Structure formats: C-alpha cells, structure tokens
Image (spheres, rainbow, N blue to C red):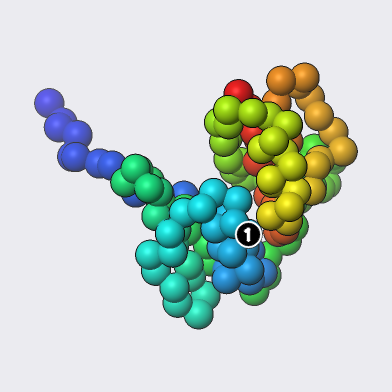
Amino acid sequence: MYGRPQMMLAGVVLDSPDAKELAAFYHRLLGWTVVQDQPDWVKLGAPDGGPALSFQTESRYVRPVWPAGPGDPQMSVHLDIQVDDLEAAGRHAEKAGAVLAEYQPQDDVRVYLDPAGHPFCLFV
C-alpha cells in the first residue's frame, strides 16, 4: 500500500503587481510580522505559528473581477478572516486600504477587495 509522506501547509501566496505594497496592506490589516522581505517576495508570519501569508510580484498580474462574469479574470483564491466585531473589523479594513465589494452575497459576511483586487471575507 502507498504511504502518504508527511505534508504540512506552510502558507498561501498572493500574486500582485507589487509584492511590497500588498504585503504592507496585509501587515496593516492583520498585524502580522514581516519574516522575509526580498525585492519581489514578502512573507508575513502568523503570530500563532500557523501558515504564513506571502506575496510575490507578478509582472503580468491581471486584477480579478468579483463576482466574475463571462470572460472576466476570475479570482483563484480568497481569504476568510474571522473577526469578533464585523462592523469594527470592516472599518479597520477600510482604514488599512480595503474597499467594500459592491456585491455582498450574505448578510453575516462582508466581502472586501484588497489593493490588488483579491477578495477577502470578514465574518463573525
């Protein structure tokens, strides 16, 4: 029988036109520590030691459209961020540089767009 090798999710990587700019946004939003800072790559470390969040510069980055229609560039991933106060977290996200998405599919979740257009959800 085939044995599965040990594997652990180490992080999520978001492409952007400017890794440093997007990392700075998530640093403001989450308060995570910069643990790696290279010209086209920045990694933020989770305070609990969980998976990291990294950003890489992609020269041909195309901003996703959310929700996507036929022929639109689609998001490939989104982040779900649990909060204790949805309204306060939303104000904080906007102050950090996020934009409330025009389309909100659920009453108890708020969808925001980061500066590179990646959607992320805040929920209690």
Determine whether the residue tagged by mark 1 lies in a helix, strand or loop: helix
Out of 51 and 96, give the one closest to the viewer.
Answer: 96
Q: Where is residue 90 in the image (x, y as percent from the top left)?
A: 72, 38
What residue is at 57 percent from the left and 36 percent from the top? 81
Is 19 displayed left or right of 73 in the figure? left
Is 109 displayed left or right of 7 in the figure? right
Residue at mark 1: 25
What residue is at 81 percent from the left and 40 percent from the top? 101
- Does residue 120 sit above or below 82 in this rendering? below
Is 47 displayed left or right of 63 in the figure? left
Say what amino acid the circle numbered 1 marks.
Phe
The quarter in which the C terminus is drawn is top right
Q: Position of residue 9 (x, y in %)?
A: 34, 43
Out of 87 and 99, give the one closest to the viewer.
Answer: 87
Q: Position of residue 93 (x, y in %)?
A: 69, 46
Furthest residue to the top?
107
